[in-house]
Amino acid sequence: MTTPTVTELVRNGNQVGKRVELARYSIPAGERVLHGQRINGVVRVTDNPAGGRGRAYLVERELEQDGNAALQALVADYVDQAERHGVIPMQVPLGRYLAHIED
């Protein structure tokens, strides 16, 4: 993934980079898309419904400190967990998720 260089100003004055699709995955509830975007110099990864309607989840932010390899590892693991368990990983309460993966 390359770092977006095009920015635009939004209403509140924050610089926002182009939103980049990092991955797609399907679960029983539907297709989802992971996006990366730089906002005020901070990289954010979000999980969004592919159809554009529904809840979005913040997966991680400030990944620019760890580099592209960390971003790629996060995306690969996130998609693997979503497809393996058939759920949006950010939607499941942590305690229930940890109990589920220990089985």
Image: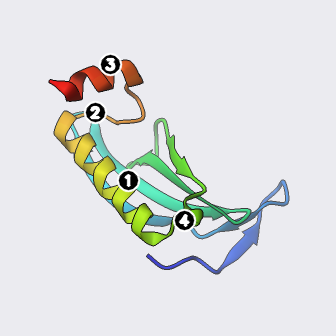
Q: Which mark is residue 96?
A: 3
Residue that mark 2 sits on = 87
Quadrant in the picture for the N terminus? bottom left
9 and 97: which is toward the camera: 97
Q: Dividing the picture into quarters, in which one does residue 12 lie?
A: bottom right
Distance from disc 3 to disc 2, alpha carbons, whole Å, reads 12 Å
Mark 4 element type: loop
Q: Amino acid at mark 2?
A: Val
Distance from disc 4 to disc 2, alpha carbons, whole Å, reads 23 Å
- Give the mark, 4 or 2, whose residue is nearer the N terminus: 4
Q: Which mark is residue 48?
A: none
Q: Amino acid at mark 1?
A: Val
Mark 1 element type: strand
In the depicted structure, whether residue 74 falls above or below residue 88: below
In the depicted structure, whether residue 101 falls above or below residue 69: above
Q: Amino acid at mark 3?
A: Arg
- Give the mark, 1 or 2, whose residue is nearer the N terminus: 1
Looking at the image, do the residues carrying marks 1 and 3 touch, with CB atoms under 8 Å apart? no
